């Protein structure tokens, strides 16, 4: 059995950074990857999907060229070339992660399926390893629930849909949240008919109703069919084409398309790691239970990234790695609860979110002030011909600290960081309100917006 100072299982966003920091500190490290280096973000998540979304945006802008006084002529999308561009960009990132690890001194790279054989013992094929510290970074995959008739149709997930090199005639998307909406809009812009089916009464239910309503309007304006309140989702074959039972309050009870994309959630890749042999505890959904420093119940074992249920984003995974490294190597105590919730929805226009929603603020009992303005008031948005959406910010009426913000509009995924940084600094909102911003930008409206604060 080979012994290491640190064993890293999985090479998503957290694993390589942990391996690098321990190896460059002079420790003996083993990095294990079962499949593709780089994890979800590099291979089936952020990088390939946002590359596809960029192609869809180009097609959409080309069709709207006449609005800007430009004659672009007929627009044709070549899905094979869209896929090739995506594959090249994703592949470059994957190669970069692998070559970085393989070229790292003090780091042994192993490819294979890692399984625990004891509390701090790992098997990778015929190899047996033990480690003083083990870091689990195995990510997650698409959830495929046992829906009626599932076996009767061919389904796509967020992974397999990336392999399409032909344009679906009619894409049925099951799930009206982040993954479903991003793919749905992209394929509509490529030229597919798109129907999005959602069990709830509105899209992206974790957001406030005004965000859901605005997103609904944006998608419908592009010709996307939305079927909400779909309580009895099931599938059946209709002459070789997939049919989806939706049983909504309005509209036909079934939709027949050419392809079905299932985007109803994620599950952690923890079911085949032998966690029980190590005594590592998971919750009812399979997520590894960790404390505020990302330690499992077993001494010397940490869980990072999507598999710990403490965040489902690339940035939370990387931040997990930073927390662990700070605690173990830098004598700098950091905790998961120190971070502020922030994320983006990368439809067009994008949504940038930070902090608490209106519903969470009201539930907290805080005395709050809120301001909201449409993007039609943002000259940069008007000039670009992209004035859909709004920006909203809420503050504590007593401390004057910012509680939360949502920017649904052009540049919203970038502008939100101006707000986020002030939140981390725990400074009053007046710091932004009194700042002089550049004109014409989206950010310049933030001081004006904060002048509109009124009781929530």
Image (cartoon, rainbow, N blue to C red):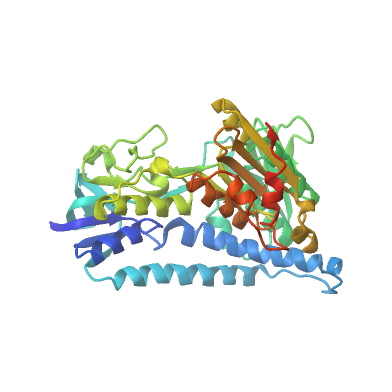
Residue 358, given in percent of the width and then of the height, sits at 62, 34
Between 287 and 334, the residue placed more toward the observer is 334
Residue 206, given in percent of the width and then of the height, sits at 59, 37
Q: Is residue 319 above or below residue 357?
A: below
Judge whether residue 336 can be spotted in this image: yes
Q: Is residue 226 above or below residue 440?
A: above
In the rendered image, the quadrant that contains the N terminus is bottom left
Q: Residue at x 33, y 39 (%)?
A: 290
How many labels sit on residues?
Answer: 0
Describe residue 433's horizontal placement relative to residue 72 as left or right. left
Q: Determine which quarter of the picture holds residue 280.
A: top left
Residue 18, given in percent of the width and then of the height, sits at 31, 58
Judge whether residue 238 can be spotted in this image: no
Describe residue 26's horizontal placement relative to residue 293 as left or right. left
In the rendered image, the quadrant that contains the C terminus is top right
Residue 64, given in percent of the width and then of the height, sits at 81, 65
Q: Residue at x 19, y 62 (%)?
A: 27
Q: Is residue 312 above or below residue 358?
A: below
Describe residue 323's horizontal placement relative to residue 345 as left or right. left
Between 420 and 283, the residue placed more toward the observer is 420
Taking the view exactly as shown, the residue that stands out farthest to the front is 434
């Amino acid at each position: 059995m080979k012994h290491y100072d640190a064993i890293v299982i999985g090479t998503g966003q957290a694993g390589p950074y942990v391996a690098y920091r321990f190896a460059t500190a002079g420790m003996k490290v083993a990095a294990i990857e079962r499949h593709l280096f780089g994890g979800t973000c590099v291979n089936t998540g952020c990088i390939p999907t946002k590359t596809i979304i960029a192609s869809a945006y180009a097609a959409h802008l080309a069709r709207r060229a006449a609005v800007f006084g430009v004659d672009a002529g007929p627009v044709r999308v070549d899905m094979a070339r869209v896929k090739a561009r995506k594959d090249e960009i994703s592949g470059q990132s994957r190669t970069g992660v692998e070559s970085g690890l393989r070229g790292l001194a003090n780091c042994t790279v192993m490819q294979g399926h890692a399984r625990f054989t004891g509390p701090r013992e790992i098997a990778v094929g015929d190899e047996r390893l033990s480690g003083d510290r083990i870091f689990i970074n195995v990510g997650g995959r698409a959830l495929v629930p046992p829906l009626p008739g599932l076996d009767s149709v061919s389904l796509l997930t967020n992974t397999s849909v990336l392999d399409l090199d032909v344009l679906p005639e009619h894409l049925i998307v099951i799930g009206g949240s982040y993954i479903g909406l991003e793919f749905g809009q992209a394929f509509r812009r490529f030229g597919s008919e798109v129907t999005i089916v959602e069990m709830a009464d509105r899209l992206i239910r974790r957001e406030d109703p005004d965000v859901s309503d605005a997103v609904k309007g944006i998608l419908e304006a592009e010709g996307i069919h939305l079927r909400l309140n779909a309580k009895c989702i099931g599938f059946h074959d209709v002459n070789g084409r997939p049919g989806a039972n939706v049983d909504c309050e309005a509209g036909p009870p079934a939709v027949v398309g050419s392809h079905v994309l299932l985007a109803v959630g994620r599950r952690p890749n923890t079911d085949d790691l032998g966690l029980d042999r190590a005594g590592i505890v998971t919750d009812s959904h399979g997520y590894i239970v960790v404390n505020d420093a990302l330690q499992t119940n077993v001494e010397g074992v940490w869980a990072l990234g999507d598999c710990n249920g403490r965040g489902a984003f690339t940035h939370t995974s990387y931040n997990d790695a930073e927390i662990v490294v700070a605690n173990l190597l830098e004598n700098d105590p950091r905790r998961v609860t120190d971070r502020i919730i922030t994320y983006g929805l990368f439809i067009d226009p994008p949504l940038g979110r930070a902090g608490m929603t209106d519903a969470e603020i009201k539930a907290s009992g805080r005395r709050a002030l809120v301001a909201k303005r449409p993007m039609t008031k943002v000259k940069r948005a008007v000039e670009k011909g992209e004035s859909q959406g709004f920006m909203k910010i809420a503050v504590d009426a007593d401390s004057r600290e910012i509680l939360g913000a949502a920017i649904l509009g052009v540049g919203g995924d970038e502008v939100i960081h101006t707000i986020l940084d002030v939140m981390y600094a725990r400074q009053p909102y007046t710091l932004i309100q009194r700042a002089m911003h550049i004109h014409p930008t989206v950010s310049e409206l933030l001081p004006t917006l904060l002048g509109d604060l009124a009781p929530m």
